[in-house]
Image (cartoon, coloured by chain):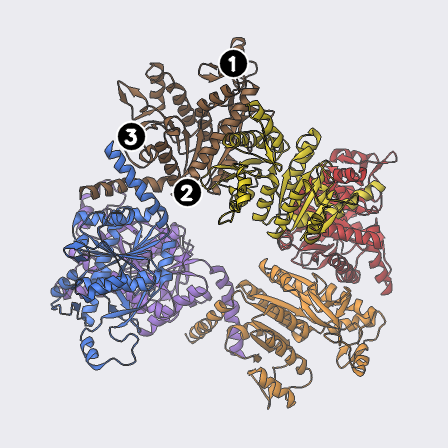
Chain colours: A orange, B purple, C blue, D brown, E yellow, F red
Amino acid sequence: MQRLIEKANTLVEALPYIKNFSGKTFVIKYGGAAQIDESLKNAFAQDIVLLNFIGIHPVVVHGGGPRISAMMKKLGKEPRFINGQRVTDQETMEIVEMVLGGLINKEIVSLINSHGGRAIGLTGKDGPLIKAVKKGTRGQGKPARGQKARETDLGLVGDVTEVDRDILLSLQREDLITVISPIGAGPGGEALNINADSAASAVASALKAEKLILLTDVPGIMEDGKTVSTLNGKRAGELMKKGVVSGGMIPKTQACLEALRAGVRKTHILDGRVPHCLLLEIFTNEGVGTEIIP
Amino acid sequence: MQRLIEKANTLVEALPYIKNFSGKTFVIKYGGAAQIDESLKNAFAQDIVLLNFIGIHPVVVHGGGPRISAMMKKLGKEPRFINGQRVTDQETMEIVEMVLGGLINKEIVSLINSHGGRAIGLTGKDGPLIKAVKKGTRGQGKPARGQKARETDLGLVGDVTEVDRDILLSLQREDLITVISPIGAGPGGEALNINADSAASAVASALKAEKLILLTDVPGIMEDGKTVSTLNGKRAGELMKKGVVSGGMIPKTQACLEALRAGVRKTHILDGRVPHCLLLEIFTNEGVGTEIIP
Amino acid sequence: MQRLIEKANTLVEALPYIKNFSGKTFVIKYGGAAQIDESLKNAFAQDIVLLNFIGIHPVVVHGGGPRISAMMKKLGKEPRFINGQRVTDQETMEIVEMVLGGLINKEIVSLINSHGGRAIGLTGKDGPLIKAVKKGTRGQGKPARGQKARETDLGLVGDVTEVDRDILLSLQREDLITVISPIGAGPGGEALNINADSAASAVASALKAEKLILLTDVPGIMEDGKTVSTLNGKRAGELMKKGVVSGGMIPKTQACLEALRAGVRKTHILDGRVPHCLLLEIFTNEGVGTEIIP
Amino acid sequence: MQRLIEKANTLVEALPYIKNFSGKTFVIKYGGAAQIDESLKNAFAQDIVLLNFIGIHPVVVHGGGPRISAMMKKLGKEPRFINGQRVTDQETMEIVEMVLGGLINKEIVSLINSHGGRAIGLTGKDGPLIKAVKKGTRGQGKPARGQKARETDLGLVGDVTEVDRDILLSLQREDLITVISPIGAGPGGEALNINADSAASAVASALKAEKLILLTDVPGIMEDGKTVSTLNGKRAGELMKKGVVSGGMIPKTQACLEALRAGVRKTHILDGRVPHCLLLEIFTNEGVGTEIIP
Amino acid sequence: MQRLIEKANTLVEALPYIKNFSGKTFVIKYGGAAQIDESLKNAFAQDIVLLNFIGIHPVVVHGGGPRISAMMKKLGKEPRFINGQRVTDQETMEIVEMVLGGLINKEIVSLINSHGGRAIGLTGKDGPLIKAVKKGTRGQGKPARGQKARETDLGLVGDVTEVDRDILLSLQREDLITVISPIGAGPGGEALNINADSAASAVASALKAEKLILLTDVPGIMEDGKTVSTLNGKRAGELMKKGVVSGGMIPKTQACLEALRAGVRKTHILDGRVPHCLLLEIFTNEGVGTEIIP
Amino acid sequence: MQRLIEKANTLVEALPYIKNFSGKTFVIKYGGAAQIDESLKNAFAQDIVLLNFIGIHPVVVHGGGPRISAMMKKLGKEPRFINGQRVTDQETMEIVEMVLGGLINKEIVSLINSHGGRAIGLTGKDGPLIKAVKKGTRGQGKPARGQKARETDLGLVGDVTEVDRDILLSLQREDLITVISPIGAGPGGEALNINADSAASAVASALKAEKLILLTDVPGIMEDGKTVSTLNGKRAGELMKKGVVSGGMIPKTQACLEALRAGVRKTHILDGRVPHCLLLEIFTNEGVGTEIIP
């Protein structure tokens, strides 16, 4: 009987969310352990299909750094990074396009389809969905010299300037789940390498999504050894200043803050190692990570 | 973590039902303990509102025997029953209309509305929604003498001949929850007293509902001291013949079988004493009663 | 030939009204002789069905005082009135609900249906359609002492605070004729007894009806022994001040004036003793009562 | 009061017709006295506008023989007839087109418009609306010699082979009243002179009209000095054989019978000298002529 | 191969126009050689049908002066002109209506239909489509004496005051090609003779057409012996002042300028002697006349 | 003037095609010289955009053999072919996916987008759009031994079993141009290498396309030194038997015949070296290759 009561309570808890999120868009950055562990991969794909099933529009943006590096080595190129960003020459960019757009994107699409979904995969060149400029050139008359020098070193790495929301809405209308490789189309149509968290944030912003969810391999933002379950943008800024938010969590937190500024309702940094963390975060009052709200 | 896993499992279990039942009609006979106990009343109303919230069309048919008898006594009339059916003279019928249509129906409507629903209450005269004839006269040239004598004694007790599904569909289109008093409109427009289980069955049949659910005060159909969780129509017939199904469970089982014959997908005799028995039966694999399938 | 010419003239007179009123809403307070005399009852129901037939949306609000008093006496309670308003304790309110919602409402519904209409009956609790507060408490921080004392005496008598027009429009869209019992839902869902003319006026106001029509047992507003066929709001106010409008005609006139202030186009106090007075008033230039215009 | 009762009765009589004829098409052959007398002309135009006003689609087909003859004489040509049909050479046909299409059609259009309608006038060449062949050549391999000789004498006189209902439905959808001159488009696009009763019958047939109405200058079909108010096709045939129907009434009766065979619901030969004969015939149980039914 | 390249270039040139003009309205004044020469007549009709075929809405306004004069003479009346405008007494007006509305309009309609179009012909009386007042009385309290005297001499010659665009849009919605005779309906419904260029300009203005195209028998506006291929309104005014634009080209230029002021996008004075001049002007960059733009 | 006449004739020729092909689907196999020569590439992209512009739905299926071989060599693998088909082991398949789906597909998409289109690129795994089985296993209980041995050698080479037309129709509804890489999804979701002509044929068949167009580097099917401009399926079969159709033209001819059998209206083998060959074939009567009709 206790089990029945708990099940009933879970349902009573979940049903209003189900109703309220119907027709809403959730943009999910997919990466880390959830992209590697077989069991987590399947739970993720099942969650995406179930979300779609009950009327939510999930949009997946994926990464794939390690496999790019592996293919580079196979082709005799040594991967090189500056401040965690891949130095991307023309040849490397082709490898990025082949690995992200040709392999990983299609694997995720197939995984979702094998659980009963109907997914299609795009890169930012399709449409074009994601317009970008070379990093450091966005909105600048003329960059400071030192900065320019530094950034030029990265090569074909880009910042998003525009996301074509109409294409994504078109695919939603047709009830297709979109999986996006973080490759941008430059002013001359050339490919640019985009950070996946930034791409997800830009996509969520363009769609004024209900949620931006970033899957990570940590329990969320930690303070004093405990996960902070919810905080607002102001407090997130303070934690960054105080160094409580640090390292790889900084760009993720910034991606969330940019999305909030653009009108996304809520952002989440989730522990992707918890199976079905998407369902738990979305439909229950349980915390499986940190929620950053306006 | 175990709690999270169980919650996630409940959701994984429930979401496909939620999708599949969206837009479907469930006809629920409401009565017994669930109509008396304050806590069960509220859980019932909450369930109805949540069902409606996620796109299911619940239709409630209620009973109310004890309060009819109480009002009869207040007006100086002694309630009389033959084979469990109320003998209904003209004066009694007016009391039935007043108590069911004027009081109980509106109380249920108010209860649902107080939980956030938008319910309206009808009797079979509205529309007219339920056409009926005096019991024993349906489809008969001339009744056998003994039978006629017996049935005439019941007075204004009726059998349903037709349910106007268009009205119910109209109210569903307008997203209103319908609560029905089991009163029929006779050929001359006169009121007839209808058994609530039969009325619910006839309504479910007319709507070719996804489910007919009868709330009772027992754990379902029992065999050898255990609840039978599922059985088909043939087996249900055998259990009636063998006397395993007996007493008050016989008309309920018959109501289910008639509904199945008319195209209702599944029928359920639930233990209305379990809080949220509707949600549990509909969205989980748990059994809180007996399911009779075609 | 003279007869032909008169018929043709009646048609030439009526057809433009028919066109212009198509799709419009008429709220009709039904009561008095027209609710008792068999022949007038049938003419009324025929009119309602014909109006609906040609695309007008009639909404009926009914009274029923005498039968409430009769049932009270049957149950051993003595009816009591203050300034023409029924003192309504809890027990009386239940009787009001039973008689209005359980009996009279359904009789009118059946009468209309027997003439080929498709009517359903509601009380203010359904939806809830009519929200109300106890008389004297509407919009007041703290009532004056004398007033409070006086009005508390009336018990569960209410003033309308809100009519849910969406429900009525829903039923119109589904081409159902609505018949309303003047019972309001109080803040806690409790029933409140509402004056039928006020209820009709509030319903017409919420719907911004084309017409509010009050059936009476008199020839309209009389002045110098003659019926005033048309007057505007200002003149109506003057006639009340001068005492030309007096007695039972005062609340009816006030109901009309409130409706006009809320945007109802025209209001009519008709002589319900004239058969088919509705058709005559609506489709001809004949006067069968008094019309009050903005 | 008697007058009120009669008005009310006229309305009770008319309203169901109004509902039932809503959206239906009536084809009216307009000619004779009703086309000449100023007062009848205005009553006719008013009727057409009122019919249109309440949702009926009137289509008018007109004649105009006398004015064609007058213009011929003005141009120095002598009108000649064989069996009541105008002998039509090329020059005569041009005069027919000018007088019917250029003058009379536009006068009727203007008359209807001046009463508040929105009429446009067409000839059979527009669209082309009416396709025709020279009289005597319809559906014949080779005409019998004598016949051919006889009919060739008529010149450019045609039989309708096809009416383009789509154009008429288009104009109805746009709520325009169509006024048609009985001129057909021959196989090579040349104009052909068509009998107006036949043209009206063909138009009604193509539209499967609710009614074909022929205005005449007589009280209808007479037998034993009295107007026959209603008769079916079989009886009409008998009356023609017996010579009771004779003279100019024969082609009108045949036009009615052909329309009935093509699926027109009812046909009427009305006395166009009775003002508002259209309204009287359509909305009352009065007879102002003869009705021929299937 | 050269031929293939030229064809391909023609298509590459034309396709964007085809797309951009889809759904747009072109008003074409039809007259002169193109209305007389058999081969030009057929090319014109073919162009109209092709335009309509690919989603453009052509509206044709025609003239017909010479044939009016011929018929006048046949009826013994001598045509008389003042400043190029026909003096129009009542009898003359009837002849105008007969010849334009009864003959020429229907010939053009038949010509278009014979090429596969679906055209219908109207005069300004239909609807009424074109409302007009006697020349010189538009918008004037009291005309100057000299002017009045002069203009009264013209008789029933009118200026357009209003074009009923709804009728034209109705016919477009139904995919009918409209052919208009330049006859206006005066305040009392009487016919008025309108200049065809003015009528076309007024129709184009009312429809806020994409183009107004006037077919002429000259190569366009000439300056220094060469056709001016494009000029704006200001320059056109200057050329009139300088006398470069003179004679019959003045009213045509004024018709264009009025249309531009009313919101027509472009106007064209074409050489109607070039076969398919419509297609060439619309779908290629070739000039076959003069284009006047805002 | 001669040039004007030729332009006009090209338009008169093209416009009916434009109308008739509006809303129709054309499937185009893109490969060979047209995929390499800069000028031809741009003419091709312009044609695709123009087709889409005027309401035609082009679907592009591309090849890419040479670049796959080049990448294989870069990764140290030697390309191997049996009967012109690439032997495809697991590693090779990954390279196929990377080069076709990651590089070539996106280049074509970018090319079309740079001319003003809105294209997106898919492989058969997206959706999945193209379901396939390993070559030789389609529809067979058990393959003959010799055959099996032979075909197993090809490895991951597939035959199409199903194309998901709904996805393509979805993208058409959203006015997106689809570019497809010929990669199929096997029963377990694994990628299979598909011949591009076969893939185009299967896509055209699923869509019941108006046209299947295969671009080649030859002038079409040749007989006696001349291009056969049109032939039907029967004749095509004969020419294959007689050896007139031979070599690489055989699978192309078979792809056409299969499409015709599946309901495609017309198929074309075009000379892709002629600039704008698509426009010329579609909108003119010129032959730039061979047309095979049912």
Which residue is identified by label 3? D287
Amino acid on which disc 3 is placed = Gly
F205 w.r.t. C132: above or below: above
- Left or right, residue C150 beside residue D92: left
User: Could you tell me which secondary element the residue under label 1 belongs to?
Assistant: helix
What separation in Å lies between label 3 and label 1 (alpha carbons)?
38 Å
Amino acid on which disc 1 is placed = Glu
- Left or right, residue D154 beside residue B256: right
Could you say where residue A15 lies in the image, as x and y percent from the top left? Answer: 46, 69
Amino acid on which disc 2 is placed = Gly
Chain containing the residue with disc 2: D
Could you say where residue D181 lies in the image, as x and y percent from the top left? Answer: 49, 29
Of circles 3 and 2, the one toward us is: 2
User: Could you tell me which secondary element the residue under label 3 belongs to?
Assistant: loop
Q: Which mark is residue D151?
A: 1
Of circles 2 and 1, the one toward us is: 2
